[in-house]
Image: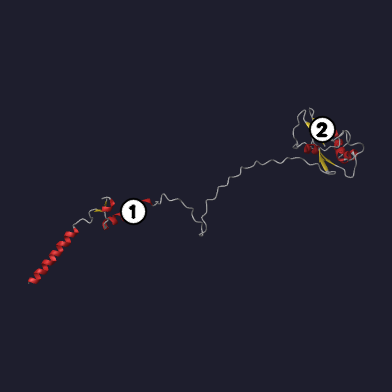
Amino acid sequence: MKKRSMLILILITITLLVMTGCTRSATRAPRTDPDAGDIPFPESTQSQILEDILAATQTAKAQEPTASTKEPTDAPATGGGEPTQAAAVQPTAAPQEETKPSSFPTATPGVPATYTIQQDEFPFCIARRFDVNAGDLLAINGLNLDSYVVTGFVLTLPQNSAFVGERALRAHPTEYTVQAGDTIGKIACSFGDVNPYDIYAVNGLDQGAALTVGQVLRIP
């Protein structure tokens, strides 16, 4: 019974000692090093080391860039290739104005089968121009020297026929100054063997273009 009482007393004493040790501070008083000029150097305890590690960890986390501050990266190309950049927008070319092709008439080579009389033209003028006999031209169209044809009249031109006499009435190529009342047909007939279509072409004029007094035309 005494032994049991002694054992219980020893256990109680050990328990009191353990509890007293747990309530003491974990830190120790600064140790003075006599060689260091009496400057105290505190000894780090286990709890202080743990606090330093925790503080360093929190500082490192605070310095890490967040998702909103990270630099954006190019999205990878489809299929796992290299990152692609957005295609540059190409400027759209300004629409070009369509240039209306000039309607320069073309002189018919040789002797056409028919010809439509234009303003200020007459059968003898057409005979000189196409090098056909004037008498043959009148006869094939049922005309005579007194006949009068109007603009739009269609003449049938004889083939294998030649004009009698000098076809040219004025020397050309040359320049001509437009007079009051002139038309391209009238000017062409005044030169005899000049085709009005050639006058339009060499002067860059559209068919039927109006003339102005004093305008200088090239006559081919």
| Residue wearing tag 1 | 56
Look at the picture and state if 6 lies above or below 143.
Answer: below
- Report the amino acid beneath label 1: Ala
From the top left corner, tell me how far across and down residue 93 is, in percent: 61, 44
| Residue wearing tag 2 | 175
Question: Where, quadrant-wise, is the N terminus in this rendering?
Answer: bottom left
From the top left corner, tell me how far across and down residue 7 is, in percent: 11, 69
**Residue drawn at (17%, 62%), measured in percent from left and top?**
18
Q: How many neighbours does mark 1 have within 10 angstroms: few (below 14), some (14-19), or many (20 or more)?
A: few
As drawn, the label of residue 85 is none
Count of numbered circles in the view = 2
Q: Disc 1 on helix, strand or loop?
A: helix
Q: Quadrant of residue 195?
A: top right
Query: In the rendered view, does 138 fall on the left or right side of 118?
Result: right
- Report the amino acid beneath label 2: Glu
Question: Where, quadrant-wise, is the C terminus in this rendering?
Answer: top right
Closer to the camera, 214 or 130? Answer: 214
Q: How many neighbours does mark 2 have within 10 angstroms: few (below 14), some (14-19), or many (20 or more)?
A: few
From the top left corner, tell me how far across and down residue 191 is, in percent: 85, 34
Residues under labels 1 and 2: Cα distance?
A: 102 Å
Q: Disc 2 on helix, strand or loop?
A: strand
From the top left corner, tell me how far across and down residue 11 is, in percent: 13, 66
**Residue drawn at (82%, 32%), measured in percent from left and top?**
175
